Image (tube, helix red, strand yellow):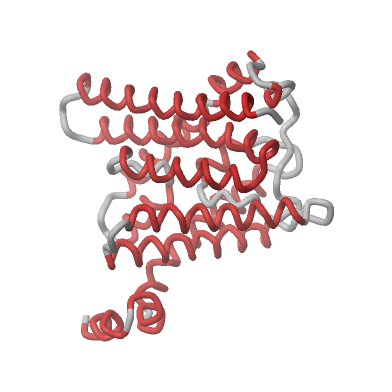
Amino acid sequence: MSTTALGISALFMVGCCALAQIARVISRRLVTREGLVPILINEAIAAAELCACCFELIIVADNFGVSMYAVCLFLLTIWWGRVWGDASACPYTHMEDVVEGRTSFKEMALRSWAELMGGCCVYRVVQVFWWLELAETHRGRAFEACNADMQVSPYLGAVIEGVATLLCRLASKTISEKEPRFGSYIDSFIGTSLVVAVYAFNYVLLAAFNFSGGYFNPVLATALKWGCRGHTHLEHIIVYWIGACAGAVLSIPVFKVPAVRRLLLGEGAASKSKQE
């Protein structure tokens, strides 16, 4: 594929990020009061930005390989970490907050709803862009049939999503507690590595079987794969919602286990955990 097509994909993703940032600025000026409304708007914008870019990342991965996909995803995650603020565009982070008593069930549900609306509605924008076929890689993509990534048992898929999400959340908690220099870059690298590892495994073993797709985010998985051929709605919920959310919530007690803290944070952290 030509570098022109890659450039068009890159420009689309940059444009999505720029428009999302403009939307944030406008929303802050229009909604000046504090409360839940600006939080929900911020979550919806973040989810729309995430999903729009990830739709185009599929084009990049399919046509330019996993390496280019990884570079783009890494740069995007660094940008998102800098501009999203308190938004996460991911429901299970709010579920963790509920479990740890930092937020209410109502706020968690409303944030998740806002993320779903932002992530799912933005597909129409992406579809129009693909329909224009400005790049050869977009030909026929706007209205093509959608196929599920998961072709194993939904229970095995849920375990894969859950374990990978658990590892990702443990890494994030470790970085958050250690607060190292360039922590956001390290966190982005770890998240990218997990996604790319699963994607590469799927790519290499495509002739034999797929795993779960490696989304590690229920909203992203729903925006990209809800209603696709190859799994039922219930199977989708089991894998991408129950599996991923269970892994995230499980990371809370796992991170408090002294042996795990010793492994991730060192001897001092484990001793401190026992005293608490």
Residue 109 seen anywhere in this rendered image of the structure: no
The residue at the point 56 percent across, 27 percent down is 7
The residue at the point 72 percent across, 44 percent down is 231
Q: Is residue 107 above or below residue 2?
A: below
Give the image location of residue 253, x and y in percent.
39, 72
Give the image location of residue 84, x and y in percent.
33, 39
Give the image location of residue 49, x and y in percent.
44, 32
The residue at the point 57 percent across, 48 percent down is 215
Give the image location of residue 63, x and y in percent.
70, 36
Image quadrant assignment for residue 201:
bottom right
Image quadrant assignment for residue 174:
bottom left
Q: Does 41 sit left or right of 134 as displayed? A: left
The residue at the point 26 percent across, 24 percent down is 25
Residue 217 seen anywhere in this rendered image of the structure: yes
Q: Residue furthest right?
A: 207
Q: Is residue 69 above or below residue 254?
A: above
Q: Residue furthest left?
A: 33
**Closer to the camera in the image, 47 or 263:** 263
Q: Does 46 sit left or right of 145 as displayed? A: left
Q: Is residue 184 above or below residue 86?
A: below
